[in-house]
Image (cartoon, rainbow, N blue to C red):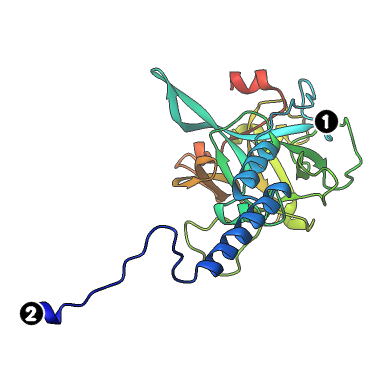
């Protein structure tokens, strides 16, 4: 290239503003003010996540009912025979607690449990908002202090410690009228109290089911929990582990797993726990 054909460009020092500098400055100022306003209103995603963890994982002392399960007291639904996916030293840990789940997409607009929250089984068995329920009679929710017997229908009302004034939520099974996928998880929290929210229990061993019907249930007793409408037992979806906002958790549904001796397998074995000491023994 000839020297006469060279193009000379004008150079600027650092004090010269180029481009849409005015619009960019105004936009940065607006973004900063918007950030301050969201921070003051506690609307930032980080703040919402902290509030969510604080509300759902806040430890709570269970209202212990004593030796037997009673209506009106707190319980946890624990699959005591299933491995928790972690171990302390060489000793494996067992126990998965029925828990409500808030997904990553719901964190933006939810800070407590709500209608439609999916139910999972979590290795976190410490009593907290997401895994503690109130045992209520399906016939009269005002009953308090009466023993729960095998065969009695009951409701599991979720404990919402973050918003006690919110509408009550119940553990509900949604049956499917058509063949469903094996990994479908139909148990959720619902503000609609209908017959799909009714559950019942029966003894674990077949030889005890006839004589045990109508007898009180001991705290931490291994038993079978059935949905009254579907007539299927609560079970662990051990092949359906997922990574959630609270760590790896397992799916839960209603399905019968029976061996050749007509006994329920470990997937269907649960305990209703109302005492931390009993849970550790189980």
Relative to 174, is 242 above or below?
A: above
- Position of residue 182 measured from the top left corner of the image (x, y, whole percent): 47, 58
Relative to 266, is 279 above or below?
A: above
| Residue 98, disc | none
The C terminus lies in quadrant: top right
Under circle 2, the secondary element is loop
Question: Is there any visible trace of residue 270 in the rendered image?
Answer: yes
Disc 2 to disc 1, C-alpha distance: 102 Å
Under circle 1, the secondary element is loop
Q: Residue furthest right?
A: 142
- Position of residue 123 measured from the top left corner of the image (x, y, whole percent): 53, 34
Question: Sequence order check: which comes first, mark 2 or mark 1?
Answer: 2
- Position of residue 164 measured from the top left corner of the image (x, y, whole percent): 83, 42
Task: Quadrant for residue 125, please give it.
Answer: top right
- Position of residue 232 measured from the top left corner of the image (x, y, whole percent): 61, 51
In the image, is 26 to the left or to the right of 241?
right
Relative to 41, is 145 above or below?
A: above
Sort mark 2 into few (<14), some (14-19) or many (20+) by Cα contacts within 10 Å. few
- The residue sitting at 77% across, 38% down in the picture is 161
In the image, is 274 to the left or to the right of 246?
right
- The residue sitting at 55% across, 38% down in the picture is 122
Residue holding disc 1: 147
| Residue 2, disc | 2
| Marks 2, 1: nearer the viewer | 2
Sort mark 1 into few (<14), some (14-19) or many (20+) by Cα contacts within 10 Å. some
Relative to 51, is 172 above or below?
A: below
């Amino acid at each position: 290239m000839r020297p006469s054909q060279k193009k000379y460009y004008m150079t600027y020092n650092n004090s010269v503003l180029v481009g849409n500098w005015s619009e960019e400055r105004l936009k940065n100022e607006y973004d900063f003010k918007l950030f301050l306003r969201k921070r003051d209103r506690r609307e930032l995603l980080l703040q919402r996540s902290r509030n969510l963890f604080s509300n759902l994982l806040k430890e709570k002392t269970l209202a212990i009912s004593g030796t037997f399960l009673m209506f009106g007291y707190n319980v946890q639904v624990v699959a005591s025979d299933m491995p928790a996916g972690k171990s302390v030293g060489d000793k494996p840990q067992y126990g998965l607690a029925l828990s409500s789940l808030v997904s990553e997409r719901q964190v933006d607009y939810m800070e407590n449990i709500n209608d439609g929250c999916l139910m999972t089984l979590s290795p976190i068995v410490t009593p907290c908002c997401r895994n503690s329920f109130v045992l209520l009679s399906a016939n009269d929710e005002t009953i308090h202090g009466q023993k729960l017997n095998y065969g009695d229908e009951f409701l599991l009302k979720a404990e919402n410690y973050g918003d006690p004034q919110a509408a009550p939520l119940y553990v509900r099974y949604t049956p499917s009228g058509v063949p469903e996928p094996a990994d479908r998880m139909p148990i959720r929290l619902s503000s609609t109290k209908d017959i799909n929210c009714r559950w019942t229990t029966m003894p674990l061993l077949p030889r005890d089911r006839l004589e045990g019907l109508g007898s009180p249930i001991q705290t931490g007793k291994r038993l079978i929990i059935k949905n009254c409408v579907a007539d299927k037992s609560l079970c662990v979806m051990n092949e359906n582990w997922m990574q959630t906002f609270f760590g790896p958790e397992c799916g839960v549904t209603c399905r019968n797993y029976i061996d050749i001796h007509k006994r329920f397998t470990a997937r269907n074995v649960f305990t209703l726990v109302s005492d931390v000491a009993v849970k550790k023994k189980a």
